[in-house]
Image: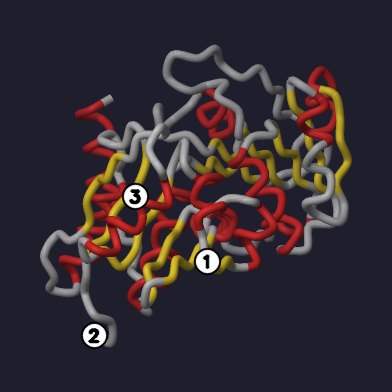
Amino acid sequence: MSWVAGKLAIIGWPVSHSRSPLIHNYWLAAQGLPPLYEAYPIDPKDDFRAALRGMADAGFVGANVTVPHKEAAFAAMDALSPAAQILGAVNTISFENGRLQGDNTDGDGFLAGLDAASQRGAPDGNWQNAPALVLGAGGAARAIIAALGRAGIDDIRLVNRTRDKAEALSGLAPHIAIGDWQDRAALADGCGLLVNTTSLGMTGQPPLEMPLDGLKSGALVSDIVYTPLHTPLLRAAQASGYIAVDGLGMLLHQAALSFEIWTGMRPHIDDKLRALLVTDLAEKD
């Protein structure tokens, strides 16, 4: 191995529920290394940059960042990747010779998950050759919209229950049309990709009411949550013959990109790891 192994972490508050330690320690074990990756809670009331300096002193070489700290991580960095600069948020930190380097792998991880699902479901299909409809305007939507723009989607349709929040994202990609929430079914007409980034359909939340009959044949329907893994939206998509993309795809692929940033090695996302995650979700949720 070409990297100097050191401690890794997922930073959040709370963070004990995170599946990141399971994922990264699986990949570390594949390299013959002990479980170096841990959950690292940081209270939002604490000095975030000081906490990061403490991590560096304690031997950490990298960290993922989850809610509510992605914007605080952005502000604390000494250097930022182009993706992090565009999004104003950091989900991957590298501790490099006393400097804090920030990146954001969420968008590219989402795209990689789509590609993997597309190849499994319709090897000859190409989700990039049709419009995309995104529901929601939170942090995940920001990363996904920017990534779709980089992927060359020239017709991105965005709706949110609060239209003003959607309009605030209109500069993230060259070709974004903002619509009203009540018009989401009409806006899905001809789309090859539908992405739900809202909380609707999550455990404890109301289901998402979203007709799918206007989507292009072979379209991908993505729900970025994984609790539950098979949301009502995804079950409806499968029943209608579309390709359902659950939230584990984005989770695993963004993690793989972080792992590569720290180690220089792209880990393999195999069926055994996915099965471990599915079992863990079933046991704890």
In the visual, does 135 lie left or right of 50?
right
Instruction: Indicate the position of residue 37 as horizontal and vertical percent values.
Output: 22, 56
Mark 2, residues whose alpha carbon is within 10 Å: few (<14), some, or many (≥20)?
Answer: few
- Residue carrying label 3: 51
- Residue at 87%, 52% (x, y): give it: 175
Mark 3, residues whose alpha carbon is within 10 Å: few (<14), some, or many (≥20)?
Answer: few
From the viewer's perspective, is residue 159 above or below residue 112? above
Marks 1/3: CA–CA distance: 15 Å
Say whether disc 1 or disc 2 marks the residue closer to the N-terminus.
2
Q: Is residue 119 visible?
A: no
Say whether disc 3 or disc 2 marks the residue closer to the N-terminus.
2
Q: Secondary structure at mark 2?
A: loop
- Residue carrying label 1: 78
In the visual, does 171 lie left or right of 45?
right
Viewer-proximal residue, 238 or 105?
A: 105
Mark 1, residues whose alpha carbon is within 10 Å: few (<14), some, or many (≥20)?
Answer: few
Checking the image for residue 1, the label placed there is: 2
From the viewer's perspective, is residue 196 above or below residue 151? above
Instruction: Indicate the position of residue 112 as horizontal and vertical percent values.
Output: 53, 60
Q: Amino acid at mark 2?
A: Met
